[in-house]
Image (cartoon, rainbow, N blue to C red):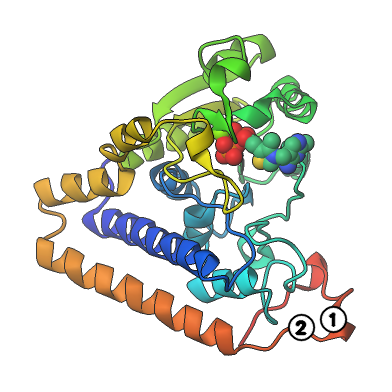
């Protein structure tokens, strides 16, 4: 099914906003204004493809730390992100008590996750079981990096979902690296999708730098899940264009030539070129969108900088059951 022009433009807008916000976070970090940032630059097409393949407001999400673009598609705002980076009052995912990028957004069915990688996988399987027991029409999507699919929890969660044919999509954003460790030192198989055969579920690999192709593959997985045909493992092949986090220096384990060669396939540039070629977007409209995105990011930075820190009395409150939002 071809997505309408409006939907394609919304996808592009969200990717663009995520990129500008992410770039701004790096600058704030280097200026010493925030303590930590973990980046999604290079992963935006995979995330937006997934976000636009499910039914927002109805389906469930158990994302991981790189999913800024995904979260923006689900209703997280630039201000929410800036409040998180600066640890300010009103931060919606944890009241500013969790590290940034540890998402949780109750109003959008985004379930909170912990720092130990792959702990979200059994959570997603459990949510899938709940959906099946209640007879709901929903699907749950959980995302993860390829390195984390070596964890015991990942196998346990996927195995359980496959046995019980649960409506779960296991999205793996394969960026080749787990911090400094390359894929061939993480797994003996050539692709994450190949692991599906040993666990008894459908496994599909997709070019995660192609947003429309990712959307199509994840939408097919969602249709299978809703039809009672069980879970799908979707491996979106991407590349992390930045260091692992603001604490990492990737020059110690990969060459500049390698990074530059992947920049030539930047998913944001690729989608822009596709939209221009298909006359969905014009150069002028793109320039206006970019200016608007930069403006929204600057406004978020300004408001977050002026926002107060949480009160000591808020240290143990609120909790997920009673989500707070800033005004
Ligand atoms: C159980 C556990 N071990 C180690 C870490 C430290 N750690 C955080 S992210 C990460 C790399 C994960 O790589 P991958 O799953 O490929 O995701 P990516 O960061 O590349 O998106 C590691 C080792 C952790 N958070 N949890
Ligand atoms: Mg990785």
Q: Is mark 2 within 8 Å of ligand 1?
A: no
**The image quarter in which residue 90 lies:** bottom right
Q: Secondary structure at mark 1?
A: helix
Q: Establish if 301 lies above or below 125.
A: below
Nearer to us in this view, 307 or 80: 307
Residue 139 falls left or right of residue 75: right
Q: Establish if 172 lies above or below 27.
A: above
Quadrant housing the N terminus: top left
- Tell me the residue at 55%/21% (across/down): 183
> Which mark, residue 310?
2
Classed neighbour count for the residue bearing mark 1: other residues with Cα under 10 Å, few (<14), some (14–19), many (≥20): few
- Tell me the residue at 49%/71% (across/down): 78
Nearer to us in this view, 181 or 284: 181
Ligand 1 visible in quadrant: top right
Query: Where residue 25 sits: x, y (%)?
Result: 50, 65
- Tell me the residue at 67%/46% (across/down): 136
Residue 258 falls left or right of residue 167: left
Query: Where residue 82 sits: x, y (%)?
Result: 56, 73
- Res. 170 in view: no
- Provide the residue designation for mark 1: 314
Query: Where residue 276 sits: x, y (%)?
Result: 13, 51
- Res. 50 in view: yes
Q: How many marks?
A: 2
Q: Are marks 2 and 1 in contact (CB under 8 Å)?
A: yes
- Tell me the residue at 56%/60% (across/down): 57
Q: Residue furthest front?
A: 252
Query: Where residue 106 sits: x, y (%)?
Result: 69, 64
Nearer to us in this view, 105 or 66: 66
**The image quarter in which residue 266 lies:** top left
Q: Establish if 70 lies above or below 194.
A: below
Q: CA distance from mark 2 to mark 1?
A: 6 Å
């Amino acid at each position: 099914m071809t997505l309408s022009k409006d939907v394609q433009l919304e996808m592009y807008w969200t990717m663009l906003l995520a990129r500008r916000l992410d770039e701004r976070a790096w600058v704030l970090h280097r200026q010493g204004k925030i303590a930590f940032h973990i980046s999604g630059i290079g992963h935006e097409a995979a995330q937006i493809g997934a976000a636009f393949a499910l039914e927002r407001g109805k389906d469930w999400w158990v994302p991981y730390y790189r999913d800024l673009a995904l979260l923006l598609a689900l209703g997280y705002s630039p201000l929410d992100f800036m409040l998180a980076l600066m640890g300010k009052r009103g931060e919606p995912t944890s009241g500013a008590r969790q590290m940034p990028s540890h998402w949780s957004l109750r109003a959008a069915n985004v379930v909170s996750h912990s720092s130990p990688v792959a702990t979200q996988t059994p959570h997603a399987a459990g949510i899938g079981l709940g959906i099946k027991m209640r007879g709901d029409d929903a699907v749950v999507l959980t995302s993860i990096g390829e390195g984390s699919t070596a964890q015991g929890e990942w196998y346990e969660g996927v195995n359980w979902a496959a046995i019980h044919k649960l409506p779960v999509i296991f999205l793996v954003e394969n960026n080749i690296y787990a911090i400094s460790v390359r894929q061939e030192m993480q797994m003996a198989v050539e692709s994450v999708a190949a692991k599906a055969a040993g666990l008894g579920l459908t496994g599909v690999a997709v070019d995660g730098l192609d947003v429309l192709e990712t959307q199509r593959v994840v939408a097919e997985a969602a249709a299978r899940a809703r039809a009672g045909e069980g879970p799908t493992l979707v491996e979106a092949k991407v590349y992390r264009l930045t260091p692992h986090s603001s604490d990492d220096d990737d020059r110690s384990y990969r060459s500049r030539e390698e990074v530059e060669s992947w920049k030539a396939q930047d998913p944001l540039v690729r989608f822009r070129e596709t939209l221009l070629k298909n006359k969905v977007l014009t150069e002028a409209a793109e320039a206006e969108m970019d200016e608007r995105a930069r403006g929204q990011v600057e406004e978020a930075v300004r408001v977050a900088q002026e926002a107060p820190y949480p009160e000591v009395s808020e240290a143990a409150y609120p909790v997920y059951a009673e989500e707070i939002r800033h005004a």
